[in-house]
Image: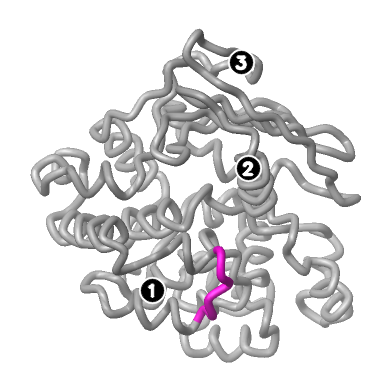
Amino acid sequence: MIACPCPDRRTPRSGTLAVRLALPAGFRPADVLALHGRDPLQTAECTGADSLCKGLVWRGRPAVLSVLFRTDHAVAKLTVDGAAEADESAALVAMVRRMLGLDQAVAAFERCHRHHPALGALIAAQSGLRVPQAATPFEALSWAVIGQQISVRAAVAVRARLIRAAGIRHSSGLYCYPDERRLAALDTDALRAAGLSRSKAETLRTLAQAVEAGALPLDHWLATATPADDIRTNLLALRGIGPWTVDYALLRGFGHLDGSLHGDLAVRRALQRLLGMKQPPGPDATGRWLAAFSPWRALVAAHLWAFAASTNGVGDEDEKGPAARR
């Protein structure tokens, strides 16, 4: 474990951008910190009671994003190895807003379903719940591939080894989650050594190469608000990427709140408890139940994850992947 870089720490060769973002009433920083604080080794992220530091690749350069949460606002700073240009501030604001879920239609969802006989109590108890995002769509998609058919605890360990294998390190000492160029440069043996199965290693390499070559323009799709169905069609064409992986990546990478995630076992188990069922409902039955909440099905899944975590400590942070593995 390394010491978390101080948000104000700079090195002689670093540049810093800083922005302030207003937070809505009832914003829940703990949800953001929980997502980014899963790695006990703090390989590329470290969290405090009200702060986050995350290593990432910013326009080809190692960088550390720090976010400090206050009651009604957050201060985000990006410390880049190399010069930071003033015109990058708008891009930083857009990334942080997305990561915090600030543009998600949470209020509309809660108004629409707060009186639902089963879900209403969860909405009241978890008011303001948003779905925190990965820094980039590529991070979300590659993480979804890593997490296929294994628990999140196992996936977090593989992810940490993969980040170290990629070897991108900020001058502060924090490793950076690799971009598609660096992952595409890793051979299958290096990915296998990080703990990926051969099929996952090949899927991850194919994915990274396709993104680097422009065949999968994830960032362009994000910037142009490409319809989720179009993204889904393109991603499903890749061998090794199935519906659960796509829905999870759409949720964490694009903020698409209508992915069904009906195959997720943690969702099904939480629904079992919520409805007082003897057994978890099957994927099809779960899908039919979630259908009533479109266009917020994935937000409902997030409420079920939070419910599971609050009742027995098991949620999205502990169980993950398509129903086929369970």
- Where residue 17 appears, as percent x and y from the top left, is 64, 29
The magenta span reads 223-228
- Where residue 18 appears, as percent x and y from the top left, is 70, 30
- Is residue 126 found left or right of 33 in the rendered image? right
- Is residue 286 found left or right of 8 in the rendered image? left
Q: Amino acid at mark 2?
A: Leu
Determine whether the residue tagged by mark 2 lies in a helix, strand or loop.
Answer: helix
Task: Name, please, the residue furthest toward the left.
Answer: 189
Residue bearing the label numbered 2: 92
- Decide if residue 17 is in sight here: yes
Determine whether the residue tagged by mark 1 lies in a helix, strand or loop.
Answer: helix
Taking depth in this image into account, of 108 and 64 the one nearest to the observer is 64
Q: Amino acid at mark 3?
A: Cys
- The reply to whether dot 2 and dot 1 touch (C-beta < 8 Å) is no
| Quadrant occupied by the N terminus | top left
Give the label on residue 6, or none. 3
